[in-house]
Image: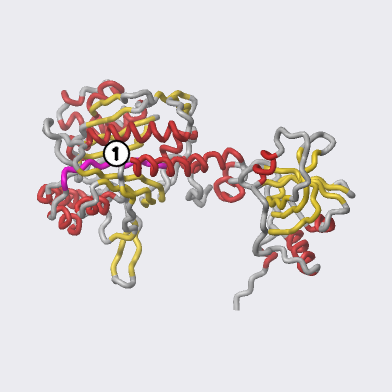
């Protein structure tokens, strides 16, 4: 039999106080407390008033300040809305409970509003209740970076951590509001998939006992959402978690949040318009209309319209390399000199992409649409209607990183099958991030995908920009951390 020893997990002095409360017949974890209002409502009620009512209030919150002066005590409590000072004396029912309370405990207090000799609004407590006895000591000082990542519930008590997460949740809410205002339908699609696809990434594998087969956590929502368009949902989006078995660093987390949307009768030009509209709408809503962001000590200008560059133009501007004048061998040599690798074999388009990511991408600070990528960069995009060897794709670059990705979606089933076959060949040649042959998606395309534009936006990176956060971990409620950290 496995026994649980509380002293192996919790602070012994707090366990002693817990036992003291229980021995006195006090339940340190009552099921409810009927509070009158949030703490901010109480303080707002009397903010500018000199006269106070004799109205009784029932307030609750976590002890953040504890000053026991013997016959009287001042406690500072806080909830989600704000904080209030409690005044207690020996006439307070439950005054003797103070000996069993600590920083971090959650308490309830019934009393009337007063002002102290210093004029501070307080609640004169007539009755004190224990609502939650905490069993570990919260930190007295500000958490260090490692503690912030490993102890997220306590880190959220700090104003800057909480503010970033509030911005994150507000951003997601505003994205929904924007899309629903344009008649998009929110969908939810499969997380466990027979075949992974929709991006170049290494998946997480699991095993389904019921099917006796290996399955994968989705690396994108793209293919299922396009099946919904085939099924007649002409404007559809999903805000969901995707999973890629990649590095953990300042810009990558193996589990992250993506917005993907698809609109029938649209192309990548329409998606550029939607991207500008959506990002500016979110910035206006979350940051009160400012079109200038401060990020990593530099300014980002969101003034519209945003610049458009092809990959080769960006390489020429920021790397002083004229790709169009290079032979394939010269291009490969220069790309490798800049650190490029080609696990599935070199091609001209992949060489251009690798060179772009090295010499140009970090230099693109203000919002820039990089357009008309080489065909080899994705198997899911329609060929450019005017430029041979190019596809109708853009990536939105901001602050030296990709924020959004978009295609005029490929809807030719035969061509899609040929692209998948080429990707499978690359996979067998050693490119572990190449797409797989997805028979289910090909079957869906065979029933007819209308002309469609698609867009994906990394929500975590958008929130990083909005909060001037240089690490993705700072904007995730519960980031994944390396064991070495």
User: What residue is rendered at 22% in x and 36% in y?
Assistant: 268
Residue 381, horizontal then vertical, whole percent:
19, 42
Residue 18 position (above or below residue 341): below
Taking the magenta stretch, the answer to whether it contains residue 404 is no
Q: How is the image coloured?
A: secondary structure
User: What residue is rendered at 72% in x and 63% in y?
Assistant: 28
Depth check: 318 or 310 in front?
A: 310
Depth check: 62 or 246 in front?
A: 62
Q: Quadrant of residue 192?
A: bottom left
- Residue 221 as seen in the image, left or right of residue 101: left
According to the image, label 1 marks what residue? 405
Residue 256, horizontal then vertical, whole percent:
41, 48
Residue 280 position (above or below residue 91): above
Q: Quadrant of residue 195?
A: bottom left
User: What residue is rendered at 44% in x and 25% in y?
Assistant: 292
Which SS type dominates the magenta stretch?
Answer: strand
Depth check: 181 or 455 in front?
A: 181
Depth check: 406 or 237 in front?
A: 237
Q: In what element is the residue under mark 1? A: strand
- Residue 73 as seen in the image, left or right of residue 107: right
Taking the magenta stretch, the answer to whether it contains residue 453 is yes
Whether residue 345 can be seen here: no
Q: Which residues are magenta?
A: 450-459
Residue 383, horizontal then vertical, whole percent:
14, 38
Residue 300, horizontal then vertical, whole percent:
42, 25
């Amino acid at each position: 039999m496995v026994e649980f020893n509380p002293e192996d997990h919790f602070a012994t002095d707090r366990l002693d106080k817990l036992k003291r409360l229980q021995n006195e017949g006090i339940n340190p974890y009552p099921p409810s407390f009927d509070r009158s209002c949030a703490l901010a409502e109480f303080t707002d009620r009397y903010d500018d008033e000199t006269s106070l009512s004799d109205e009784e209030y029932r307030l609750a919150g976590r002890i953040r300040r504890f000053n026991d002066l013997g016959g009287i005590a001042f406690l500072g409590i806080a909830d989600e809305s704000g904080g209030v000072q409690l005044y207690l004396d020996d006439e307070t029912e439950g005054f003797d409970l103070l000996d069993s309370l600590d920083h971090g405990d959650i308490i309830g207090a019934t009393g009337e509003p007063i002002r102290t000799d210093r004029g501070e609004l307080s609640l004169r407590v007539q009755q004190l209740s224990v609502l939650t006895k905490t069993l570990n000591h919260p930190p007295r000082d500000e958490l260090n970076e490692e503690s912030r990542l490993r102890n997220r519930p306590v880190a959220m008590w700090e104003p800057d951590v909480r503010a970033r997460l509030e911005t994150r949740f507000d951003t997601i809410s505003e994205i929904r509001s924007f899309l629903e205002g344009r008649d998009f339908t929110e969908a939810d699609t499969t997380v466990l998939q027979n075949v992974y696809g929709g991006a170049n990434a290494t998946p997480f594998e699991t095993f389904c006992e019921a099917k006796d087969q290996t399955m994968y956590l989705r690396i994108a929502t793209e293919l299922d959402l396009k099946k919904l368009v085939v099924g007649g949902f002409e404007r559809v989006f999903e805000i969901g978690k995707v999973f890629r078995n990649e590095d953990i660093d300042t810009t990558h987390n193996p589990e992250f949040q993506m917005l993907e949307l698809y609109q029938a009768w649209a192309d990548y030009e329409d998606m550029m318009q939607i991207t500008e509209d959506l990002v500016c709408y979110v910035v206006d809503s979350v940051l009160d209309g400012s079109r200038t962001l401060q990020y990593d000590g530099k300014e980002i200008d969101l003034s519209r319209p945003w610049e458009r560059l092809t990959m080769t133009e960006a390489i020429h501007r920021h790397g002083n390399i004229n790709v169009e004048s290079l032979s394939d061998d010269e291009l490969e040599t220069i790309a490798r000199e800049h650190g490029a690798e080609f696990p599935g074999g070199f091609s001209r388009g992949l060489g251009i992409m690798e060179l772009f990511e090295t010499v140009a991408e970090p230099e693109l600070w203000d919002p820039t649409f990089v357009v008309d990528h080489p065909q080899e960069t994705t198997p899911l995009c329609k060929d450019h209607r005017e430029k041979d060897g190019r596809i109708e794709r853009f990536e939105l670059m901001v602050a030296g990183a990709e924020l959004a990705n978009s295609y005029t979606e490929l809807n030719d089933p035969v061509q899609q099958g040929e692209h998948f076959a080429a990707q499978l060949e690359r996979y067998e040649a050693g490119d572990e991030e190449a797409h797989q042959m997805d028979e289910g998606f090909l079957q869906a395309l065979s029933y007819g995908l209308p002309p469609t534009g698609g867009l994906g936006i990394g929500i975590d990176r958008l929130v990083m920009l909005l909060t001037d956060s240089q690490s993705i971990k700072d904007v995730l409620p519960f980031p994944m951390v390396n064991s070495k950290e």
